[in-house]
Image (tube, grey):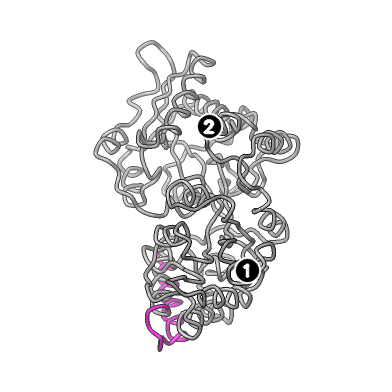
Amino acid sequence: MRSTGIRRTLVALSVGALALTACGSGGDEAADGKTRITVNCMPPKSAKVDRQFFEEDVAAFEKKNPDIDVVPHDAFPCQDPKTFDAKLAGGQMEDVFYTYFTDARHVVDINQAADLTPYVKELKSYSTIQQQLRDIYTVDGKIYGIPRTGYSMGLIYNRALFEKAGLDPDDPPATWEEVRAAAKRIAALGDGTVGYADYSAQNQGGWHFTAELYSQGGDVVNEDGTQATVDTPEGRAVLRTLHDMRWTDESMGSKQLLVINDAQQMMGSGKLGMYLAAPDNIPILVKEKGAEYKDIAIAPMPGGKATLVGGDGYMFSKKATPEQIRAGLKWLDHMFLTPGDGFLGDYARAKQNDAPVGLPEPRLFTGAADARDQQAKKANANVPVENYQAFLDGNQKFEMKIEPPHAQQLYSVLDGVVSAVLTKEDADIDRLLKDASGKIDGILARS
C-alpha cells in the first residue's frame, strides 16, 4: 500500500513469495559482468495492473542502464513484521529493501543498514524530497534510507449519509464533539447504520488511539522516548469520547473488535458514516467494497492539533557493495522519485488504466519538483478532487507527527485499552491507562 493501514493487516506471504525472498542477491555481479541488485516490494501477480507497471518500469530502467541487472522479488505485504527481523538477522534481506518509517532507527541500531551518506549526492532527486521525510532516515547525522511515499490520517466520511442525516457534507466535523454529534444523527437513521467505527484488534486499535491522542495534542511517549505519556488528560479524553459514543449514544454499533477491513466493508456498503484512515483507503472502498467516488470524502483529523503521518522508503543491506548502492539509488530515482513519472508518478498511464489519480496524498517533493508533480497529477485527475479539499487545507495547519518508537509493541498494549472501552461499559479508564503506562515504560526500558 502506498501508506496507511492497509499494510498493517498482516497477510501471509505465498509460498512462492517466501521462496523468492529467502534468496539473497548471490553476489553483486551477474554472469555477464553487470552489477546485480535484488529489490523487494514488487506487486504480486494478483495485482495485474500494478505488476505490469512495475515490470515495464524495471525493463525501461535496465534498457537505460545496460550495466545493471535488477532482480525484483514480489510479496504482499511488502514487509511482513513477522518475518522482517528474521530476514535481517539471517542475511536474507534484499540488497534494496522496503521499510516503514518506523523501521529506520531499529534497522540502524541492529547494524543491518548500509550508510548511504557518501553516495546520496549521486541521487539526483534527494534534495527535492521533503526535509521532514529525509530526516526520518537520518540517524546521528548519517543517511540510511530514502523516502518513497508518505501518508497522513484523516476522517473518511460518507457524503450521502451526511445528507440523509441532515448534515452538510461540505462542512465535515472539525472537533471530536462534532464527530460525536454527527455520529449520533447518522446512527439514528437506523437500518443497521453506524455513525462512527474504530479499530480495536490486531494492533490497529493502538494505532488509532495514537492518532486520536495526537489530534488532541497528546503523545504516547515523551520526547526522548524513555517514558509513557498516555496516562494524561488527553489520553482520558480519547477513551471517554469512544466510551460515550459506544455506550451512551450507541452510535458505534454493537459489533466491536473491528479491523480495517471491517470498516471498509461497512463504508463500502453504505452503512457507515465515518472512520479514521488515510486517502489510500478511498480507491479500495470504490474498487473492492462497492462505494462510489462521489459519495466518499475525507476531512482533516478532528481536534485540530496534529495528525499521525507515516509512510515508507527503501534501505540498503549492510552487505551491499558500493556498486550495488550506486545502482540501487539510480533505480529508486527512476522508479519512484521522478516527478510525474515512474511507478508511482506516471499519472497519465494510471489514468489510462483506470487507476485513481488526484487523491490527496501528502507531497513528497518540494519546490520545482513538487510543482511538476502536482501539475501532472492535476492534468490527469479522474476522481472528485473537491471531496478532498478540506483535508488538504486542514493539513496545512497541523503538526505532522510520526509514529512512536517501537510502535507495534506499544500498539499491542494500547489495543487492549481500546478494546476494553468498546466492549465493557464499566471499563475503568483511569486503571486501563495506568496499567498501559506501566507496560509501555517496561518496553521502553528494555529497548
- Near mark 2 (Cα within 10 A), the count class, few <14, some 14-19 or many ≥20, is many
Q: Is residue 406 visible?
A: no
Q: Which amino acid does label 1 sit on?
A: Pro
Residue 57: percent from the left, percent from the top? Answer: 50, 25
- Near mark 1 (Cα within 10 A), the count class, few <14, some 14-19 or many ≥20, is many
* Marks 2 and 1 in Cβ contact (< 8 Å): no
User: What residue sits 61% from the left and 27% below the top?
Assistant: 122
Question: Magenta stretch containing residue 363, yes or no?
Answer: no
Q: Name the residue under label 1.
A: 302
Q: Which of marks 2 and 1 is nearer the N terminus?
A: 1
Q: Mark 2 points at which residue?
A: 343
- Which element carries disc 2, helix, strand or loop? helix
- Residue 404, placed above or below residue 328: below
The image quadrant that residue 162 belongs to is bottom right
Q: Is residue 47 visible?
A: yes
Residue 299 left/right relative to 87: right
User: What residue sits 47% from the left and 18% below the top?
Assistant: 68
User: Viewer-proximal residue, 402 or 395?
Assistant: 395
Q: Quarter holding the C terminus?
A: bottom left
What kind of secondary structure does the magenta stretch mostly adopt? helix
Residue 359 left/right relative to 253: right
The image quadrant that residue 382 belongs to is top right
User: What residue sits 55% from the left and 26% below the top?
Assistant: 330
User: Viewer-proximal residue, 131 or 274?
Assistant: 274
What is the distance, in whole Å, between disc 2 and disc 1 at their CAs? 33 Å
Residue 447 left/right relative to 295: left
Residue 235: percent from the left, percent from the top? Answer: 54, 77
- Which element carries disc 1, helix, strand or loop? loop
User: What residue sits 57% from the left and 33% below the top?
Assistant: 351
Q: The magenta stretch spans which residues?
A: 422-447
